[in-house]
Amino acid sequence: FTLAAEQGLAGAQGNLGLCYALGRGVEHDLAEAARYFSLAAEQGLASAQFWFGYLSECGRGARRDLNEAVRLYRAAAAQGNVLALVQLGICLEKGRGVEQDGAEAAARYAEASAASAIGGDAARIFAHGAYLIEHVDAQSEPSAPSSFYAQVAVRELALAARLGHEGALEKLATVSRRREVASVCCMGCGAT
């Protein structure tokens, strides 16, 4: 992906950002992940807008900027990105980076649920979260890539449960019992 990313291809930039975020094929580096997500987000790639928004919200690899995170979530949500719709709903519900608005939060959750039902996203999100959780090294340091995997996995399993996937709550309970993941808020970034 590196050559294509350096040539400015948004999809490659987004994929390379994810590789850096997860430590896949490259050294785990959230600053590099944020750099590539930012480049792809500027070109309108919804998944990169979501991920750069997440890193901006959490202040991991990028400067913590809740207003920028909400702006990016809105841009990705406008393209139907389910994760962005849910995260935007959370921000609206809690007043994080935006004025608290329970009605709009509920509308974003409903939109995410509808988009998920149409696109089969609940099953896809569950499958990805379950895959990640199975590859978590429970003994790793909190800053290690596997910790990042665990945080993303828990968030995805919770989203799949919220979207109605029947196995997601059971998988979350298994994760909790195995104590692989600490209490996670805001996709594990610790923001409240």
Image: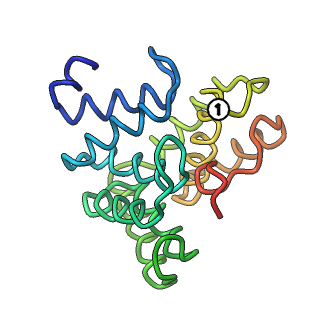
Seen in the picture, residue 190 relative to 138 is either above or below; the reply is below
Q: How is the image coloured?
A: rainbow
Q: Residue at x 59, y 56 (%)?
A: 186
Seen in the picture, residue 187 relative to 88 is either above or below; the reply is above
Label 1 crowding class (10 Å Cα cut-off): few <14, some 14-19, many 20+?
many
Q: Residue at x 67, y 54 (%)?
A: 190
Answer with the quarter of the image where residue 146 lies.
top right
Q: Residue furthest top?
A: 25
Q: Residue at x 33, y 56 (%)?
A: 118
Answer with the quarter of the image where residue 45 lies.
top left
Q: Which residue is mark 1?
A: 133
- Quadrant for the N terminus in the image: top left
Q: Residue at x 63, y 59 (%)?
A: 191
- Residue 125: x percent and y percent? 48, 43
Callout 1 amino acid: Ile
- Residue 171: x percent and y percent? 69, 41
- Residue 122: x percent and y percent? 47, 49
Seen in the picture, residue 192 relative to 38 is either above or below; the reply is below
The total of numbered circles placed on residues is: 1
Q: Nearer the viewer, residue 3 or 160?
A: 3
Q: Nearer the viewer, residue 114 or 62?
A: 62
- Quadrant for the C terminus in the image: bottom right
Q: Is residue 83 left or right of residue 132?
A: left
Q: Secondary structure at mark 1?
A: helix
- Residue 143: x percent and y percent? 66, 32
